[in-house]
Amino acid sequence: MAERKTNSKSKPAEVSPANPYFSQEALDFLRKLKRNNRREWFEARRGVYEGELKHPMLALIDRLTRGMEEYAPDHLRPPHKCMLRIYRDTRFSADKSPYKTHAAAWWTRNGLEKTSGGGYYLHLDAKELVLAAGVYMPPKEQLFAIRNYLLGHHAEFRRLIENKKLRAKMEMHDPQSLTRPPKGFPAEHPAMEWIKWRQWGVVATLPATEALKPRLPKLVEEYFRLAAPVVDFLNEPLLRAARPKANAFFALR
């Protein structure tokens, strides 16, 4: 029988789309990475990282982002723009481990990409699935904008963060509160508890095994939907501060 010739120009087999949830192999990889945080170890297992962590994370981000069209339409971004790099920035750190031992995603608010603003965060390591939403480690200008906004909108903030459905699922993130009122703010103001905060947000920590279930996208969306009003509230003063100021010359004409 004549040998069949292979077509060197034939198309490569298509890769099946990843599921929007993870496998036990993903958690095992993260657990082992913590003990073997070296480039040679990682590169030898890059295929595992991409197949079990990167591709499912991008699929999950895509699914969640499509859902955000309903409750967070200003946070829609391509999946690769939301997924955070696994490579650590070691330039100013005593710890020179090259890789993070978790996979994470962050949905920032459109118009605030350069300064981050308020957004939604997902983080998976070998033990925990962390879901959070809010403003974290904001620069000085954003700190002032949120604190100033709370002076006149503290009743609304209280209503949002004390919402029973939200607090049944999520708790306040560590606010890294100041010990004294910030300079220029009235010490006796009813919002002083929150004005002293240096970051504002809510968080839930779940077992990592929740990330192995097909219902993961639905689970995450439940938390993000509950936190959406808080994120919108925090972004309002940041958007106002980010708007370009009118040119004084033209304003007088």
Image (spheres, rainbow, N blue to C red):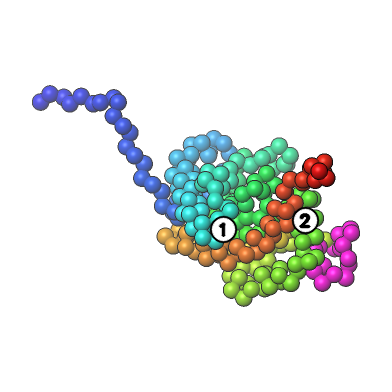
Measured along the vertical axis of the image, is residue 200 above or below residue 167?
above
Give the mark nearest the N terminus, 2 or 1.
Answer: 1
Residue type for callout 2? Ala
Q: In this view, does 135 lie to the left or right of 34?
A: right
Q: Is residue 210 left or right of residue 236?
A: left
* Disc on res. 145: 2
Q: Residue placed at 88% from the left, 65% from the top? A: 186
Q: Residue placed at 85% from the left, 70% from the top? A: 189
Measured along the vertical axis of the image, is residue 129 above or below residue 35?
below
Q: In which quarter of the image is residue 214?
A: bottom left
Measured along the vertical axis of the image, is residue 156 above or below residue 96?
below
Q: In this view, does 129 lie to the left or right of 95?
A: left
Residue 105 in percent (x, y) is at: 57, 50
Q: Quadrant of residue 88?
A: top right
Residue 228 in percent (x, y) is at: 60, 62
Q: How many marks?
A: 2
Q: Which of 35 and 215 is in front in this view?
A: 215
**Mark 2 to mark 1 CA distance (whole Å):** 21 Å
